[in-house]
Image: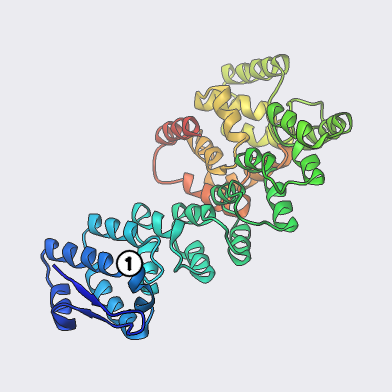
Amino acid sequence: MLSAEFGGEEGGTLSFAGGDVALLKLATSRAPADRERLLLALVELCDTRQSAQVMSSGPIQDLLGSIFMSVVMEAERDIRMRLADKLSTATWAPPALVNVLALDEIEIARPIIASSPVLQDADLVRLLLEATVEHQIEVARRPKLGPPVVSAILRQAEPAVLTALAGNVSTELSAEDMRRLVDASRRIASLRSPLARHPQLTTDLANQLYVWVGQSLRQALVGRFRLDTDALDKALGEAVRDAHGGQPVEGSQPGTWSQDAEREDLDRRLISKLDAAGQLRPAYLLRALRERKLGLFAAGMCALGAFEPEEVRSALNSDRPELLGLACAAVSIDRSVFPTILDLVRKLNGGLPGGGEEGARRAAGAFGSFTPSVAGASFRQAVRAV
């Protein structure tokens, strides 16, 4: 086992029993037991109050970096996981090693991203650019993020990462940051609840957010900010009419499409007649949208794909246009037609399904080489998950 000799505060020296060569020799061992002994012994050796200053010195950092990196690159998963957990709060850990662990699989990277004092703003921004969405979510949850990191999250506008940022109340957000999050909540439903409870939400932004949230969150906003509900409800009605091209209101809130039972029944009966006459084909769905009849489009989608109305409604009101893409693939709509369908649906449904340009690109992946029946099964499974 490794041991160390620490000089007093005045001496400030550190030596490893057996010398540097012995450590490096042990580091080259391929035996898992040797690797674990080396890594964990070094961590225990270094992670002491007396050695913190010594560990920061250039020569020791170089030695530790070479030893750790030579072992970690070939270490097994459980060893890397234990190492990440132990190094997550270490101020002396070599930056190169910390960054390697932060890019490892998410279960290993999570404690490093969450807590490591070695990670700087530039390192976190790099994770946002290079790592998976799971890593990005952990970055957004990290306490007290700096402005460069917040700006990078807002610029990328990944829904799950934005939602994690909205729930990170320890991070100071500027007025512009909050405005951008509230604006995004129009298309990203998961943002609404954390924003409604965010300590930096202002009255002006609460008025804007009120239009997009459900009844329970509206009540919370009214109680917190004493909002003028009469004026807001009037604005809400106008927003709903705008979302449906000035047609009679079909839904209870903007950007969340639904129909009253009578209108839905009329649309379903018309679609049934077309189907019985052999005239219901995928091309009719595009025609319905061009005639600004979103209800007929939804009813036709249900008939052609054997979907439940709630399934189609969820796809139309989500922030994942790939759900609509799967539904279209399931009823044999051609990939080349889908961008037009998505654009028309968004215009009739207050911008939903959301996801912006990036979401539209993701949705194109729904039109793979699989059969319509496989696309239909995938659609039902994905909607249930949502």
Nearer the observer, 225 or 233: 225
Q: Is residue 192 left or right of residue 176?
A: left
Nearer the observer, 1 or 108: 1
Which residue does the image show at 58% across and 48% down from the upper left? 159
Please state, as top left, top right, bottom left or bottom right, where the N terminus lies in the image: bottom left
| Colouring mode (rainbow / by chain / secondary structure / one colour) | rainbow
Q: Is residue 34 left or right of residue 176?
A: left
**Amino acid type at mark 1:** Thr
Mark yes or no: residue 74 visible.
no
SS type, badge 1: loop
Query: Dividing the picture into quarters, in which one does residue 81 lie?
Result: bottom left
In this figure, which residue is indicated by the disc labeled 1? 48
Residue 283, percent across and down? 61, 35
Residue 35, percent across and down? 17, 65
Which residue does the image show at 80% across and 37% down from the upper left? 225
Which residue does the image show at 46% across and 30% down from the upper left? 380
Q: Is residue 187 above or below residue 229?
A: below
